[in-house]
Structures are given as structure tokens and as C-alpha cells.
Image (cartoon, rainbow, N blue to C red):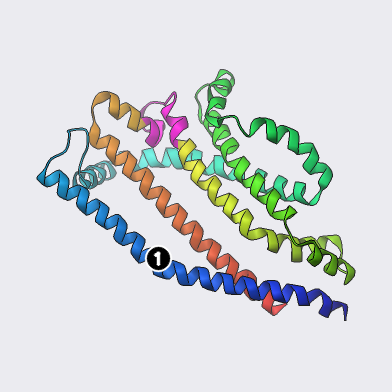
Amino acid sequence: MTGTALHQPQAVEHRQARQGVAASEWMLERRWPVALAGAVTLLALWQLYGSTVGLPEYILTPVEIARSAAELTASGRLVELASASLRRLVFGFTIGTATGVLLGLLSGVSRKLGDLLDGPVSLTYPIPKITFLPIIAIWLGFSDPARIIVIAAACFFPAYLNAHAATRSVDQSLVWVAMNAGAGKLRTLMQVVLPAALPRTVAGIRQALALAFIFMFATEAIGSGTGTDAGLGGEMFAARTTGEYEVLWAALATVALLGGTVDATFRWLVGKLMIGQELEAGRG
């Protein structure tokens, strides 16, 4: 009887979630061709205008950008620049997001911890995170650790706030039903609270991922290093100074391509995770 009582509200949640996943997949399958067509149309118009009317020397056409990117890739320069940038991004995103999600979930479950963290979060959240870099640079210089700390700080807040709000907004009636049915705190947390909080938590992680790219570029542009260690952001600003506009545009296109690819991959993985979660719940 208790097992039935525990699974009834979950069954409703699982059925609704399956419907939501199916609807999301249906929309995604039909939206991506439109999105791709929009991007191709924009590039085609850009190329057409540049080929017929002409563009200033500091604005390249898509074909010229692709040619420059291919040459820089063949020389290995673009790969080394992208590797330096992605190294900082991965470390900063992982540290900031993991910390934010963990503390967000825990503070959502524990009222005392939430109250304890509310003060520091409220004080530091409005501060532009890029302003941390000059302060940290006094201690660490304009180094990789300094940039990673700033990226991590930028990623922390959307991850924390969304995970915290997601946990707090879980329907308490489901929690009470599970507890009354004999589920302990840990089982209730794992089988009721976390699955219900997952969609909004994932949304926070996606926001953090976008910010990781933004702050990767910003931290590299400020106090950029030398050579390929400068990363894509540092190389863009150096190319602007020297008038190497083909390098500037190739680096910018690489950032856009990496960002779009990572975001699309993330959404695909999330879709698989949601489906896997529903299949596992169905077996249970």
C-alpha cells in the first residue's frame, strides 16, 4: 500500500515529463532546419552584399573568413589558440557550475544553509564578475588561474540560483506523500526532489555555459598573454592592433562555431538524459 502511495504521484510526474520531453523533441526536430536556413540566408546575404556593393577592409565576407580560418587551421595556429581558450573555459565552467549546483541544491533543501549563503550571494551577485580580474591579478597576475577563477565566479551564480530556486519550488505535497509512505529523507531527495528540480537546474547550467564563453573571451582580451597562449580573445585584440583583420574574423568565427557546437551538444545530451530518466522511472 505504501509503495503504491509513493509511486502514484511519481507516475503522474513521470507521465507529464515524458509528454514534455516528447513535445520538446518534436519542436526541436522541426525548428532546427528553420534555424539553419536563417543562418545560411544571413551568410548568403552578407556574401552577396560584400561581393557586389563591397565592404570596408576591416569587414571580411564569409568566404574570406572561411579561407583565413582554413589557412590558420592548416598551420596549427588556430588549433593552439582554441585549445588554450577551451582549457580555461572547461576548468572555469566545471568548477563554478559544480560548486553552484551542489550548494544550490543543498541550500534549497536546508533552510539554515540557504539563509547562511543568502547574504554573501546577495552581496556579490550584482558585481560585474570581470571586475574581479584586476583584483585577482594583483595576487596571481594575468595568468590562467586568475582567468579560471573569474570564469568560475561567472558560472557559479546562474547554476546556484537556478538549482536553489528549483529545489525550493518542488511541490511539497509530493514530498509529504513520499515521507508518509515510508520513504526516508535520502530516498525522498533522490526520487522526488532532484528529478523535479532537474529541468530548472539544467537551464541554469546552460546559462552558465553561455557565460563561460563570454568570460573566456573577456578575460583573454584583458591582459592577454603572448603567442598561442593568448587564446582566441587575446588573439583578436592583438590582430585588431596589427591590422590582421583576417585573423580577427577567423578567431571570432571559431568562438561562434565552438559556442554553437557546445550548446547544441549540451541540449542533445540533456534530451538523452531526460529520456533515460523517464525510462528508468518507468522500470521502477
Which quarter of the figure is the N terminus placed in? Answer: bottom right
Q: Mark 1 points at which residue?
A: 31
Asked whether residue 98 is in view, the answer is no
Q: Which of 275 and 14 is in front in this view?
A: 14
Which type of secondary structure does the marked residue at label 1 adopt?
helix
- Mark 1 neighbour density, 10 Å: few (under 14) some (14–19) many (20 or more): few
Q: Viewed as shown, does residue 135 lie left or right of 177?
A: left
What segment carries the magenta color?
217-234
Residue that sits furthest to the left in the current view: 52
Instruction: Note whether 34 is above or below 94 in the view shown.
Output: below
Provide residue 235's location: percent of width, then percent of height: 34, 32
Q: Viewed as shown, does residue 63 lie left or right of 189?
A: left
Provide residue 183's location: percent of width, then percent of height: 86, 68
Asked whether residue 209 is in view, the answer is yes
Instruction: Note whether 83 is above or below 144 in the view shown.
Output: below
Quarter assignment of residue 14: bottom right
State the residue at coordinates (21%, 53%): 44
Residue 230 painted magenta: yes
State the residue at coordinates (58%, 65%): 273
Quarter assignment of residue 244: top left
